[in-house]
Image: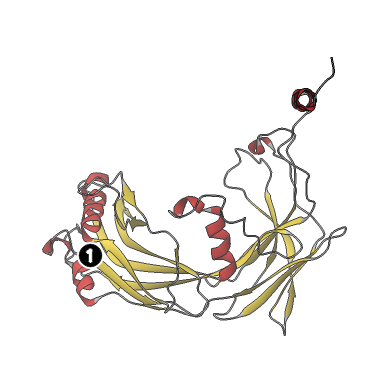
Amino acid sequence: MKRTPKMIVPLRLTIVAFCVVSGLFSSCNQPFDPRGDLDQRPVVFSVLSTDRNLQFVRVERSYMPAGYDVLAYDADNFIPDAVVTVSNGSLTMRLRDTTLPRSDTSRFNFPLRAYVVSPFKPLYGGSYNVRVEVAGFEPASGSIVVPMKPYLDIDPMSRSVLDRPGGYIKDVNIVLPMILGKGAYGYRVRLFVDYEVLKGSEWVEERVEIPSAFALAGSSDLSYVIYPRFTRSPSNNRAVGVHSHDVYSRTLVDVAYMKYGSTKIIFNRIVVQLIQLDRNLFGYYISTHAQHDPHSIRLDEPAFFPVAGGFGAIGAYTLDSLVHVLPENFPYSRY
């Protein structure tokens, strides 16, 4: 019988389909490794800050764990003999290597090694370049601009709330107005209470942070509270920190009565602390804390590594504080 074109086409499609399916099943026998190839570059981490005269730079090798559990990798990847410098354009400082104690040894049981320069405190508004030269790699570097000095204050009514927490309704807020410095891309304002407690025959200084609000509406449970997070700076650099008066009062009650009972205790001062992040550090923070962004789909932006020729992060922050002294007749003090 003579075949017609209508009979030839299905036969060809059957052969093609068979080949495709066979290829799919044969590919299942090929090993699949989701880790990809290791990109060999130096990993550099450095955060310059205005609240200390000791600055660090960590330099390590990138690595690939033998299995798929990254936390199982516990080797020391510190790169010795690197040439690490910090420059402001007119002055270049070379860092020396040092060894630091590691607070957590659950994964790494060896000391922390880094490069250090001292005495050195970056200036507000200063421009700096961190450069790392390692044999076998191209130089890795990053430039930063430290944010300018901010203005920080406590609203006049809020000062009264801090001094007499029992004299106001719980819905009143503690308001902290501020003008962020130029170059601040992110910020966080925190509220602390410093106090002294008599332990035996010795007065011991302690500090408690005041949460910004209760996590659940209508709740007064200190087990579920919200603390301030880093926030993107507004375009006009004017921002306001807000803390709940109710959280403030209940935290004081918890410290004065639940924690120390009838022990003598003196509440001394309120400390308002403002941290400003430069462009690099805030960008790195955002890329590694996507869960804090309600509009993020987790994969909408790549990881932010402000290090040319390497991985890691090179950034800066400023830390400024405002102190409000509490009155001697503060209601929660016991002399």
Please name the residue that numbered disc 1 is placed on.
173
Indicate the amino acid at tag 1. Answer: Asn
Vertical side of 218 occupied by 9: above or below:
above
Residue 18: give x, y in percent of width and height: 77, 23
Residue occupying image coordinates x 36% and y 68%: 272
Give the side of residue 39 with respect to residue 249, left or right. Answer: right
Quadrant including the C terminus? bottom left
Residue 227: give x, y in percent of width and height: 37, 55
Quarter residue 55 falls in? bottom right
Residue 194: give x, y in percent of width and height: 33, 62
Residue closer to the observer: 138 or 118: 138
Q: Examine the rendering and report whether any part of residue 120 can be seen.
A: no
Residue 161: give x, y in percent of width and height: 19, 67
Residue closer to the observer: 192 or 247: 247
Q: Residues within 10 Å of mark 1 (few under 14, many from 20)?
A: many
Q: Examine the rendering and report whether any part of residue 6 can be seen.
A: yes
Quarter residue 99 falls in? bottom right
Give the side of residue 158 with respect to residue 62, left or right. Answer: left
Vertical side of 247 occupied by 185: above or below:
below
